[in-house]
Image (tube, grey):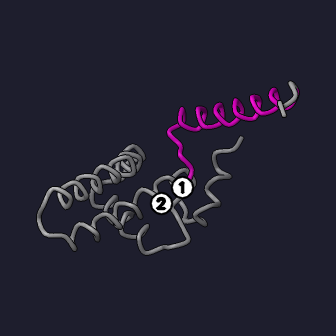
Amino acid sequence: MCPKSGEITEKKDRAEDAFLSVKAARGFGAIPAGGHTLVKLAADFTVQASNLPINNKRIALEVLSEALLEPVRMLYKNYGYTKEEIEIQLVELLKRENETYDILEQQWVGKYDILDTVLP
């Protein structure tokens, strides 16, 4: 059964709305709670790497772990944090399982609450 023209138009409109929302957020440098996810992934990769002998897979995990942290470090740097303050924040992000730091509001929030800060 072929979808009706109205259904197709509605799906296209929804896709376009989603695309424009993400584009706008990225334009402001925002990926809601993205830092929380990147820090957690980097930590997981570091743990996995530490359990491997020195080989190509371990090196790749270590490089990837550092690469995942770079956007978070850059965000904090752009907000005026020193290298030492950034590393303290990264450690704190790892400690707080259900919270993340809303750098715009300068406060800890639920890891999904930060979604509200990028909405108009």
Q: Mark number for residue 33?
A: 1
Tell me how many marks there are. 2
User: Dividing the image into 4 quarters, which one contains the N terminus?
Assistant: top right
Q: Is residue 120 magenta?
A: no
Q: 23 or 54: which is nearer to us?
A: 54
Identify which amino acid the numbered label 1 is placed on: Ala
Q: Examine the residues drawn in magenta and state their main secondary structure.
A: helix
At horizontal 19% and vertical 70% (from top left) the residue drawn is 52
Image side of residue 7 versus residue 15, left or right: right
Helix, strand or loop at mark 1: loop
User: Dividing the image into 4 quarters, which one contains the C terminus?
Assistant: top right
Give the quadrant of residue 3: top right
Is 56 above or below relative to 13? below
For label 2, the crowd category at 10 Å Cα-Cα, with few meaning under 14, some 14 to 19 and many 20 or more, is: many
Give the quadrant of residue 16: top right
Q: Is residue 28 magenta?
A: yes
Q: Position of residue 31 (x, y in %)?
A: 53, 46
At horizontal 50% and vertical 39% (from top left) the residue drawn is 29
Q: Position of residue 87 (x, y in %)?
A: 31, 62
Q: 48 or 6: which is nearer to us?
A: 6
Give the quadrant of residue 108: bottom right
Q: Which range is magenta?
A: 6-33
